[in-house]
Amino acid sequence: MLEEVVVGDRLDQDRRRYCCQPPDAPLYGALDLGTNNCRLLLATPAGSGFRVIDAFSRITRLGEGLAESGALSEAAMVRTLAALKHCAQRLTQRGVQRVRAVATEACRRASNCAVFLSRIEADTGLAMEIISAEEEARLALAGCAALLDHNPPCGLVFDIGGGSTELIRVCVRPGSAIPEIEAFLSLPFGVVTLAEECGPAIHCPDGYAATVRRLSAVLRRFDADGALTRLAAGARVQMLGTSGTVTTLAGVHLNLSRYNRAAVDGLLMDFNSVAAVSRRLLSATAEERAAHPCIGKERADLVVAGCAILEAICRVWPAGRLRVADRGVREGVLLSMMYADGMHCA
C-alpha cells in the first residue's frame, strides 16, 4: 500500500513509500483538526509501534480571523470542509475500522463551533471530538515520547500550534512508555493568532524583538520560582519541540531542497542554529520565504511568528539545544486507541 503525504496541496515525494499490510491487520485512523492544519494518519499495529499506511495534511487556516471575531469565518469553514471530505473519502476507501477525530484550539474558542461540527457530520459523516488543551498536550506527549531520553530525567515538551502553545514539564522514568506529566500550561497564542495580532510589525527587527520579550514574560508564568530555568542553564533539562514551527526551522537549517521527514524527525538543533535560522527568515522577504521548499506560500506569513515563540522559549529555558519531533497528536491518538484495544505498542 502506498503512503502518500500532502503538504499544503503538494505531494511530498520524500515521504512516499510502500508498506506491506497483512490482510487481517486492523486499520486505525487519527484525524487532528487544528487552528491551521487538518491532518490524517492511518496505521496498523506493528511490533512495538505502528506502521503508517496513509497520511494527509493540508493547511486550512480554520482559525483565520477568530481572535478578532470570536467565530469561525465562512471561508475558513468551507476550506476546512473540503479537506475533511478528502479525509473521509480516504477513510472509506481504506476501510478503516477504528477512527478518532479530534479538534483543538480553534474549535474550543469559536462561538459557532457547534454549528460547524454539525455541518462536518452532515457533509462528511465525521464525528469530531473537541478535546481540552490538557488532553491535546497529553496526546502530543504520547505521540513524541519515544524521542525523549532517560538522562536527564527532567524534560520540557512544547507544542507551538496555530492558536495556542502548550508547555509540558515531564519526568522520564526508565521502563515507562509515557513520561509522567509534572506540570502543564496552555497559552492562548500560536502562529496564526500571533501573526494576526502583531501584523507587519513582527517582520521588522524592532517589532520582532519586542514580541520575543513580551512572550518571554508570559512564558515565565510556567516557571514562577525559576527552578526549571536553573535546571536548563545547567544542562539538566532535555527539550523536545513538536510543531510545524520546529520542523520547518529544522528543514531550513538543513538546507533541504524539499522537506524530508526522515532527516528532520529526531534532529538535535543547538540554540545558536535556531537563532541563526530565525534571523535568516526575519530578514527574508515574503516572496523569499514562500519560495523556500520547506515553507511554501501557505506558511510564509506565519513562520516568523513561530520563530518568535520558539526564540522566547529558548531564551527562558537556556538548555542549549532541543530535539525536533515530526510527530505529535495524531500519533498519540493512534497509540491511545491501540493501547485501549490491547495491542502491544509502545
Image (tube, rainbow, N blue to C red):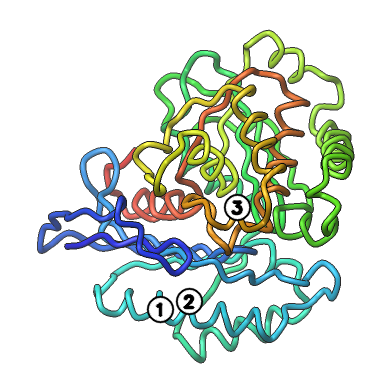
Mark 3 in CB contact with mark 2 (< 8 angstroms): no
263 or 168, which lies in front?
A: 263
Going by the image, does 16 lie left or right of 75?
A: left
Name which residue lies at 61% across and 63% down. 36
7 or 71, which lies in front?
A: 7
The image position of residue 275, as x and y in percent, is 67, 29
Going by the image, does 42 lie left or right of 181?
A: left
Circle 2: residue type: Ala
The label number, if any, that marks residue 83 in the structure image: 2
- How packed mark 3 is, by other alpha carbons closer than 10 Å (few <14, some 14-19, many 20 or more), is some
The quadrant of the picture occupied by the N terminus is bottom left
The label number, if any, that marks residue 86 in the structure image: 1
**Residue designated by label 3:** 288
Circle 3: residue type: Glu
Answer with mark 3 or mark 1, whichever residue precedes in sequence. Answer: 1
The image position of residue 79, as x and y in percent, is 57, 80
Circle 1: residue type: His
